[in-house]
Amino acid sequence: MPPGLRKIQFCSWGLLLWLSIGSAGDAPPTPQTKCTNFQNANLLRGTNLKVQFLLFTPLDPSCGQLVQESSDIQNSGFNATLGTKLLIHGFRALGTKPSWIDKFIGTLLRAANANVIAVDWVYGSTGVYFSAVENVVKLGLEISRFLRKLLVLGVPESSIHIIGVSLGAHVGGMVGHFYKGQLGRITGLDPAGPEYTKASLEERLDPGDARFVEAIHTDADSEYGGWVTLLG
Ligand SMILES: *[C@@H]1O[C@H](CO)[C@@H](O)[C@H](O)[C@H]1NC(C)=O
């Protein structure tokens, strides 16, 4: 291990210790919104998916609220009368947070009064491309389970819009398939090519996956696979 890395790990443990000591005993009297960021799989590269669902609302577009369970959703700023946009990133070679995602979320929330939920799967999306592809089914199931919690709260299937980037587009297609094409809309941004050009309809984004399905290619058939593929 390079000495620099060890120092970083040491620092982060120190920070954790400091945070846990600092937060003991002086909990704020009123509940405050706790903001959660994307994970960073750089140091602790795992095979686990460790999916985080982060809710962003028009009232606070830069604060991600961790919403894993139904109770989290009910205690968050989630508004069931608004549409919900679920954002799924793609392959992340270095296991880092997608650099474009904050801006993307801000732009979405300026354009639409909606719930935006970013799916953080940087853990499962890192390593080699083919292991990320293997995680796609597991991730699709996990997202489907999460959506079920929204439906139970009275959210109509038709109000759900999945936006999937690169490999995330096919994850969206799989989720849509699990919901028998009844979700409102799926947008695939530069759907990933490798491993998918010969995939079956269940495995990739196809027009039957939602009431409205669109794919936007910025760099079809080139060796770069599109700008979004590069950004992941
Ligand atoms: C949900 O959104 C609707 C439409 O903007 C708004 O009228 C309503 O007050 C919101 N509900 C809550 C609890 O914020």
Image (cartoon, rainbow, N blue to C red):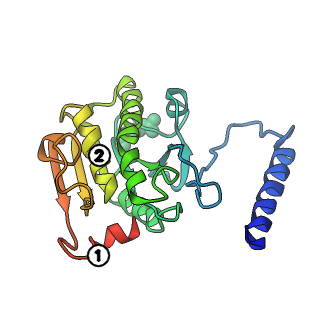
Residue depicted at x 57% and y 49% = 46
Q: Which mark sits nearer the N-terminus, 1 or 2?
A: 2
SS category of the residue bearing label 1:
loop
Q: Nearer the viewer, residue 198 or 123?
A: 198
Label at residue 224:
1
Residue 69's x, y, as percent? 52, 30
Nearer the observer, 203 or 185: 203
> Which three-letter amino acid code belongs to the residue tagged 1?
Tyr
| Residue 210 in view | no
As measured in the structure, the alpha-carbon distance from the residue carrying label 1 to the one carrying label 2 is: 22 Å
Q: Where 194 sits versus 134, above or below?
A: below
- Locate residue 11: give its quadrant: bottom right
| Disc 2 residue crowd, few under 14, some 14–19, many 20+, Cα 10 Å | many
Considering the image in quadrants, where does the C terminus appear?
bottom left
Mark 1: few/some/many CA within 10 Å (<14, 14-19, 20+)? few
157 displayed left or right of 72: left
Residue 113: x %, y % from top left: 35, 50
Query: Can you tell me which quadrant of the image ligand 1 is in?
Result: top left
Label of residue 172 in the image: 2
Percent from the top left, x then y, of residue 40? 59, 58
Q: Find out if the beta carbon at label 1 lies less than 8 Å from the nearest ligand 1 atom.
A: no
In this view, 70 is above or below 67: above
Is any part of residue 144 visible from this angle?
yes
Q: Residue at x 18, y 36 (%)?
A: 181
